[in-house]
Image (spheres, coloured by chain):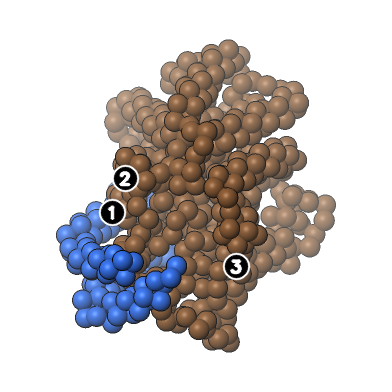
Chain colours: A blue, B brown
Amino acid sequence: MPESTSIAERSVEMQRSPEFQRLRRTFMAFILPMTALFLAWYLAYVLLAGFAPDFFAARLGESHITVGLLFGLGQFVSTFAITMLYSRWANRVYDPQADPLAARMEQGEQRGAA
Amino acid sequence: MDQEINPVINMVVFAAFVAVTLFIVFRVSRRKASENEFYAAGRSFSGRQNGIAIAGDYLSAASFLGICGAIAIAGYDGFLYSIGFLVAWLVALLLVAELLRNTGRFTMADVLSFRLKQRPVRMAAALATLAVCFFYLVAQMAGAGTLVALLMGFTDPIAKDVTIAAVGLLMIVYVIFGGMKGTTWVQIIKAALLITGACVMTLMVLFVVRFDFDALLRLAVEASPEGEAILAPGLRYTNPVDFLSLGLALVLGTAGLPHVLMRFYTVPSAKEARRSVVWAIWLIGIFYLFTLVLGFGAAALVGPEVLTDAPGGENAAAPLLALALGGPFLMALISAVAFATILAVVAGLAITAATSFAHDIYASIIKRGDVAPGAEVKVARITVVVIGVVAIVGGIIAQNQNVAFLVALAFAVAASANLPTILYSLFWRRFNTGGALWSMYGGLVSCVLLIVFSPAVSGTPKSMFPDADFSVFPLSNPGIVSIPLAFVLGIIGTFVSKPEPDHDGKQAEMEVRSFTGAGAEKATEH
């Protein structure tokens, strides 16, 4: 690839641009807290199941539903909720910021190759 | 109970599934497929199609028969297992799927070697890919023999060997002729059958208890010799540290499984990759909710004692529940679905391993990228045959062993050898070739060694070698040691080695491409 140096140069230029910095910050500001949240909630669940089985065995009133069953179903609910939140965020916030930058890079590529 | 199993109906339904899938595979196949077509189906699947195929790839016989059976016998602990398998998809959705789709072409190694030194990093990534596929494949094949023999009512040990060989042969045919496109269709059909079948059975169970879940739990408690203990954790996982180790490997392993990662290349863009994961999470999550009802349903309506005495043990829970609910015909359908499940999963593993060998090792490392058109796909097809033969032999040798640890090992290797390097190369600018090699080989070797010295291999009556005892490592899953170790080795390796001269440019190229999608591989056919 003869124009590879130019791809690298244009990439470094793009990486330093304020628009790209903003994109990366947008990404991290959503992804990092979300990841920390679901990992912490999952670890709490695994640790409770392993080290506090009696807490999980507690029944709700007269029913056969246990606290552990509710916590487990809670993992399903949180997974579905984070999936939909992420999908909405990515479509409405992230893509509109990323797409113009991709177009700018690809225009530059055509010029570089010509 | 046994005399009600009707092998003729089972065989007819199996044969119908095989005929339909073979017909579709031959219709979509092309003799002169390009690399793009053979490895990535021309990137022509929609997000929804790929999401269904991911569910088909991911929901193995262990997910269906194993989890239903575990819930039927051990109650809550079976449910615990499915939660790790589901939550793991958030790692793939949030951190890996789209960035990876933007960066690579066909394999995990494409991404990992993008900005690092090509040959050594590609080699390490290809070896980790082949190791994961091998462990997973042998586990599936070994299970297939027992399972199909049970469902067909075979008792002769030779029949099991023949069954394993037939599964391997079908896998070879699907992948050689159908490539990624054929494999994907097999997975889509299987996922539709599996989820529909589980849904119908779930509704039937709920109908029996008049849609009262509490009544279902009460019946399960009354039927179980363990009584109320099935409603809480502790019947199966008695060592909480071991359980934590397994939980870590499950949640961090999925996003490093090469056959899952490869599915993201079959769609035209990162947006479609996102849609595929969203579809996959809903399908997989709903399916695991079905297994919760089916497991307790099998406990309540079939009974744990019947299951433990059945040929195949707790794995027979779902088919026997089908027999109790809908007679021999429903059982034949559910058994055929289980068979389809195994075929679709092994086909996905075979195409991933073949792609990694042909694309990473043959074309990029041995031939240094200088390959005649068509030669790479030819090598991939030959590799499929070799992998098929190895899997058949491995499956026959391992069929009477306790192979559950092989799947745990596959997840642990994926979480330790693959995930740290994937995350570092995407998110840590300073990360370099030294860090990648330390982390990947360190993760791979520590996983395999810790398993060899674990109670899964020796020291207990359930071990692979019950008469020997060299189990110096107390846990049956290595994740809690090997995953942090691989992350730390990635940091140490990076600091003790020098970056390549073009480090900054390559890093910028990868970062811009992964975050924006500029320059990502486009679809080749419409």
Q: Which residue is mark 2?
A: B47
Asked if the residue at tag 1 contacts the one at tag 2, i.e. Cβ–Cβ closer than 8 Å, the answer is: yes
The residue labelled by disc 1 is B271
Front residue of this view, candidates B87 and B173: B173
Question: Callout 2, which amino acid?
Answer: Gly
Q: Residues within 10 Å of mark 3 (few under 14, many from 20)?
A: some
Same subunit, tags 3 and 1 = yes
Residue B399 appears left or right of A59: right
Q: Nearer the viewer, residue B304 or B343?
A: B343
Q: Residue at x 82, y 56 (%)?
A: B468
Q: CA distance from mark 3 to mark 1?
A: 30 Å
Query: Disc 3 or 1, which lies upstream in sequence?
Result: 3
Local secondary structure at mark 2: helix
Can you say which quadrant of the picture contains the C terminus of chain A?
Answer: bottom left
What residue is shown at x 33% (from left), y 75% (from top)?
A11
Q: Choose the circle earlier in sequence order: 3 or 2.
A: 2
Nearest-to-viewer mark from 3 and 2: 3
Dot 2 crowding, Cα within 10 Å, few <14, some 14–19, many 20+: many
Of A50 and B290, the residue lying toward us: B290
Three-letter code, disc 1: Lys
**Labels 3 and 2 within one chain:** yes
In the image, residue B207 lies at what x, y percent? 32, 25
Q: Mark 1: give few (<14), some (14-19) or many (20+) Cα within 10 Å.
A: some
Q: Mark 2 or 1 closer to N-term?
A: 2
| Residue B119: mark in rendering | 3
Residue at x-position 35% and y-position 41%: B525
Of all chains, the one bearing label 1 is B
**Marks 2/1: CA distance?**
8 Å
> Quick check: B440 above or below B466?
below
| Tag 3 secondary structure | helix
Q: Is residue B387 visible?
A: yes
